[in-house]
Image (spheres, rainbow, N blue to C red):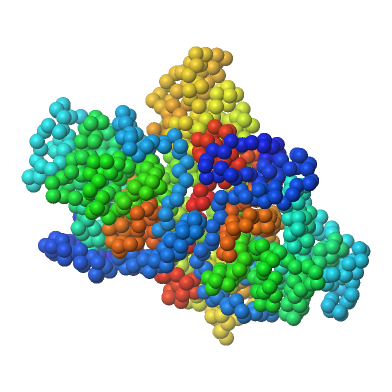
Amino acid sequence: MSETAGDAKPEVKQASKEVKESENVAEKYSAMTVSKNSEINMGELSSVFSAVPTHKPVKKQIQFVEEKQEFSRFPTKTGRRSLSRSISQSSTDSYSSAASYTDSSDDETSPRDKTQVNSKGSSDFCVKNIKQAEFGRREIEIAEQDMSALISLRKRAQSEKPLAGAKIVGCTHITAQTAVLIETLVALGAQCRWTACNIYSTQNEVAAALAERGVAAFAWKGESEDDFWWCIDRCVNTEGWQPNMILDDGGDLTHWVYKKYPNVFKKIRGIVEESVTGVHRLYQLSKAGKLCVPAMNVNDSVTKQKFDNLYCCRESILDGLKRTTDVMFGGKQVVVCGYGEVGKGCSAALKALGAVVYVTEIDPICALQACMDGFRVVKLNEVIRLVDVIITCTGNKNVVTRDQLDRMKNGCIVCNMGHSNTEIDVASLRTPELTWERVRSQVDHVIWPDGKRVILLAEGRLLNLSCSTVPTFVLSITATTQALALIELYNAPEGRYKQDVYLLPKKMDEYVASLHLATFDAHLTELTDEQAKYLGLNKNGPFKPNYYRY
Amino acid sequence: MAKDKNQKGGSWMDLALPEDFPEPYTEERAEEEEEDTEEAAKDRAVKCSPTLLRMLKAAESRWTPHFRDKAELSELGLKATEAEALKTNMKIQVSDQQEEFNKPPTKAGPRPLSHSVSQSSADSFSSVGSVSSEDECPPQEKLQKTSQGLTDFCIKNIKQAPFGRKEIDIAQQGMPALMILRKRAGGEKPLAGAKVVGCTHITAQTAVLIETLAALGAQCRWAACNIFSTQNAVAAALAEGGISVFAWKGESEDDFWWCIDRCVAADSWEPNLILDDGGDLTQWIYKKHPSLFKKLKGIVEESVTGIYRLYLLSKAGKLCVPAMNVNDSVTKQKFDNLYCCKESILDGLKRTIDVMFGGKQVVVCGYGEVGKGCCAALKGLGAVIYVTEVDPICALQACMDGLRVITLSEGIRHADMVITCTGNKNVVTREHFDRMRSGCIVCNMGHSNTEIDLASLRTRELKWHRVRPQVDHIIWPDGKRVVLLAEGRLLNLSCSTVPSFVLSVTASTQALALIELYNAPAGRYKQDVYLLPKKMDEYVASLHLPMFDAHVTELTEGQAQYLGISKHGPFKPNYYRY
């Protein structure tokens, strides 16, 4: 980071015509920090973000047919709805250490009926107990330690306040990590009102700490469905405050605004959406011609994708299996179903521990990749009798069927790293002749009449959500991406973004990555002017064409 | 499967095929086929189309709406890089190569750099090319005849044909994908009526491709794209097999263009497809025989240079036929860069200097596909690896893969080896050289010979010692030695070989691109440069899976429906990164 910060040269010789007018965000930021000029008007700011030549609408092929819920239909809030959320955020449920502070709360009245006031006299919030703010602050401070990227973003951009005037209404998980994001947005000049996108995931004391600092937070752990929509409504529907940006996770907030307050969209500059479901809903809206503001799909940015899938799963497969079954991997025969990003991560981790890994795949290109990486590509039926562990990561349904479960050897471990809980046909195991025995939390032994046991983890739900934690570093990537997407949309000149769904510009994606390099003490090489010219690139990126595959 | 064994050939016949393969192609059917008129064969190809064309149609049905999207998008001025059969609006990053399309490039040296990596390196293992011929009179002036009486070719010596045939047979062993393609599609002759004029390296591997095209129904005329790379015996074998070949090793520049002209300007034969490597053939037709473009269905181009030239043409609005960029297809890219370099870095270093890697400190400059391959290979042997990178995303990938990201100046004093794979110039400068420790090995895996600043080493105080072919010791006045490999040129081209398997991926991609262009309904491809459709890319990969005895799982109807994709692919959206 110190390198970029040191680079405050005002004039960079532009090498290529295409990026002639582009300026580097990072450079601009650092230049600002150096000059300590706090009075920069909006005109200059928008020139900061006029940089980005790569923005394109996302014509993505959504592959989850069963999720094609109508946008007008209210999703039910009855269960944990983590599956429709982005992986990284939703898994915060499982390690909300702070939540234990509040579980013992003797107060049984609904937060909606309580009047609470923070130390500054504001009562425009609704949390479980404002008195927990101090605990929450501690949680947030711990999270800040691991989210240095957001902190350095605050430092770099604080003087120019790129979000000055932005009124952001947000609907995400409310955890210590999101709190760091929210407070970063505030530090960059935004006014925020926040609500939870999941009725269980809120950390009450974090919400209290946010409220104490003046962020209007409406969320508590264990909301009813009614409460959920009430909170969203309170966020949006307030006197003398109209949002101009939406940060959404799951699309519920967008949906509510679209249904109840369509005129709010007139003032909205853009929507930032991070979950697969939400992006899918936006895409449907856009297809129907009903999307009236630009929307940014941060879920598919390179950095976030790699971290949510490849890097995160590479670690959590080992973590999840160890925690639940204490299995030893050396020499074990493992079949990994699917060789996409998740499958690649799982296979690499298992191979490193000396497991014998087989891969099943439907896509010949991925199958060929598996071959070249030294894995045997087989059909599940060919190896089902031999394997000790079966891991599904296909995103498909019924990949492991009852027929295959019947043929497994005694002690075989079956788990799912993929998508939803459809990959293993668990329903077919709920028959009278099979005995289910819960041996630990998240671990079931399914016992056949002849005494054979199959070990099913997390009842076929996602192992990485149920049985392992998500490192803060991954959440930091997501949060930083969201913050930059908001900055980009807010500062984009009129006409750059139409009423469509866009991917985060590559320039911003690279910036997210560069903010995280400091953690590794990684020193980025800088192109010389001559080299930049030779490559036809801007010295400060973007460095790769759009079709580059990383 | 039993029927397959009727065909003569090698071990590829024993390979298991996925279950959804078409009826195997048998010799009996082949003979019937040959008796048919061309017209009938073509009809059949279009009508009955059991597999290959079914697949084409699957691609087509998904393809059309996308295309419409794309057209709309490009009107909006937005980059439609995600549409299928996408246009290559690629930003070419090699500004030094910005030669005018009108200027004939000089043929003075071997021109491997402007050609695809995989094909061009055929130079280095042209075992047949070494057959010394005592005959010194130029091939143009010789009258030669094949055993069938054909004289429409020009090669060194037709008598070498049996040697060449042997080479081709060996190459067939290493390229089972093309043999499977012959079998799968042979019955339907998807190229019946196609007249392909080609300009590529003429090696045993290309010969397998050419004969595959012929087996699929095409008529071919061929010239060499490089004046040194031709294997004379292979050219002879091709001619003997009835293909009009114009090529020999060691052509002059005049010969080179003469050969190309003879290919194109044949009486009563007008090509309708071009397969080019480097763009010379396209350029010649464009300059000398522009009328031929009227009949042309498309151009398939595989080299970076050629694509760049096509792109310039297209930008100038002068491209009057569709062109297919096969260089950037997923499968080919992965093999040319990641997998190939992963192996050749070790091979190249071992062959040249017999270095041991365990515990050595290696700096790899650049963490793109090539850099990723090099690092993975070296890590496997226990080397300590440092990476330098300019792109923060790639740098973060390196961090997460457990490699230290540094600047070259920080690591240079400790490095035992410096490997460049950036595609950039002057990555290792004289200043770095001066600070290296004695015995440091410097080599280039990237692009061209610009990455290492060699000019700065040609000074009086430094002594150069050639210790082996491709290995120079550069000695500083204080006795320090730096080991420079291949004079800074590409290590993988100079000091290691390219496996047939990689060439097979390239050749299959070219064959499928030709089939796609030839069979595409009018209007699918406009006058622009396209990427190979994903469906075809997946098909290339599937052709290579039998070599690994890999069994691809098939989607059930229910699963396909759940995912919203066809059972036969394409399986991934276009923006998928693999």
Residue A38 visible to the viewer: yes
Where residue A172 sits: x, y (%)?
71, 66
At horizontal 49% and vertical 52% (from top left) the residue drawn is: A547
Q: Quadrant of residue B406?
A: top right
Q: Nearer the viewer, residue A499 or B241?
A: A499
Q: Nearer the viewer, residue A31 or B470?
A: A31
Of all residues, the one furthest to the bottom in this rendering is: A432
Left or right for A537, reference A144: left
At horizontal 55% and vertical 19% (from top left) the residue drawn is: B480
Q: Nearer the viewer, residue B490 or A124?
A: A124
Q: Quadrant of residue A169?
A: bottom right
Where residue A404 sits: x, y (%)?
48, 73
Left or right for A533, reference B557: right
Q: For the N terminus of chain A, which image quadrant?
A: top right
At horizontal 50% and vertical 56% (from top left) the residue drawn is: B78
Left or right for A136, reference A17: right
Residue A320 visible to the viewer: no
Where residue A456 sits: x, y (%)?
60, 72
- Position of residue B61 relative to residue B500, above or below, is below
At horizontal 57% and vertical 86% (from top left) the residue drawn is: A432
Of all residues, the one furthest to the left in this rendering is: B149
